Amino acid sequence: MAITTQPSKPLKIYDFEKSGHAHRVRLMASLLNLPYASIPVDLLAGEQRTPAYLKLNPFGAVPVLDDDGVIVWDSTAILVYLAKKYGNETWLPEDPQGAALVQRFLSIASGEVFRGPCAARLITVFNAPLDHETSKAVAYKLFDILDAHLDDRDFLAADHPTIADVACYSYIAHAPEGDVSLEKYDHIRHWLKRIEALPGFIAMPETRICLAT
Ligand SMILES: N[C@@H](CCC(=O)N[C@@H](CS)C(=O)NCC(=O)O)C(=O)O
């Protein structure tokens, strides 16, 4: 997976260490061997709602990418940007069917992954006022489908890793922190290991600490 270009200056990633959305972006930058500086945004102190931060992302969320003045927000949009600008076609295929397969999993990352394992972890780690049983049900339905999907393939959207895998990895790997078990999902666990074996892989720190009330 050769790199076509490198940024003229290190990328800036507005970041929160325990956010899986932010981890996706750090992971992609690292897999592409791109230099980046992580700029911590203290979500627990409300820094994401300051006027200065809202100028970067009007939704007041991490991650935001600043590539020498080019501002991109939304984690899956940032993955598309990085793949197109600094990756090669293997990370985001150009052909209609290949692109559609990747897009399907970017949508799943922003949909079922967000409402399932991500929401369950928001409840157990950050005391988010969401319904745990509902998020666990979404997570297990998603995992039933993904496990069957991965029965005869190594990666989600192609025969090699794409941004689909990067987008879905972080919250699925950390699902147990939200009390969602991966135990019966052998194919998913093997897929996670394959991502973790990629050159440049970086992990998201594990946590079970309740940080907010
Ligand atoms: N669709 C956005 C969602 C990002 C998101 O939800 N970020 C959370 C952290 S995991 C956040 O910054 N929340 C701030 C808040 O809720 O005030 C993306 O993919 O980047």
Image: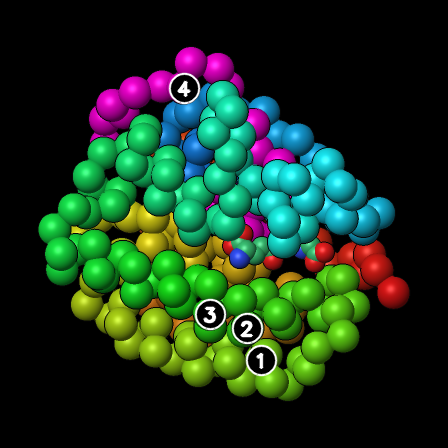
Q: Please tell me which residue is depicted at 68% across the width and 44% down the height of the picture.
A: 54
Task: Please tell me whether mark 1 sits on a helix, a strand or a loop.
Answer: helix
Amino acid at circle 2: Arg
- The reply to whether discs 2 and 3 touch (Cβ–Cβ < 8 Å) is yes
Region in magenta: 1-25
Q: Nearer the viewer, residue 191 or 100?
A: 100
Q: Nearer the viewer, residue 114 or 147?
A: 114
Task: Please tell me whether mark 4 sits on a helix, a strand or a loop.
Answer: loop
Q: Dot 3 surroundings within 10 Å: few (below 14), some, or many (20 or more)?
A: few
Q: CA distance from mark 4 to mark 1?
A: 40 Å
Q: Nearer the viewer, mark 1 or mark 2?
A: 2
Judge: label 1 CB < 8 Å from ligand 1: no
Residue denoted by label 1: 136
Task: Please tell me whether mark 2 sits on a helix, a strand or a loop.
Answer: helix
Residue denoted by label 2: 115
Q: Earlier in the sequence, mark 4 or mark 2?
A: 4
Q: Please tell me which residue is depicted at 82% across the width and 56% down the height of the picture.
A: 211
Q: Quadrant of the C terminus?
A: bottom right
Q: Is residue 199 left or right of residue 111?
A: left
What mark, if any, has residue 7 been given in the picture? Answer: 4
Q: CA distance from mark 3 to mark 4?
A: 31 Å
Q: Quadrant of the N terminus?
A: top left
Amino acid at circle 1: Lys
Q: Dot 1 surroundings within 10 Å: few (below 14), some, or many (20 or more)?
A: many
What mark, if any, has residue 111 been given in the picture? Answer: 3
Q: Is residue 161 left or right of residue 111?
A: left
Vertical side of 79 occupied by 4: above or below? above
- The reply to whether discs 3 and 4 touch (Cβ–Cβ < 8 Å) is no
Q: Earlier in the sequence, mark 4 or mark 1?
A: 4
Q: Quadrant of residue 106?
A: bottom left
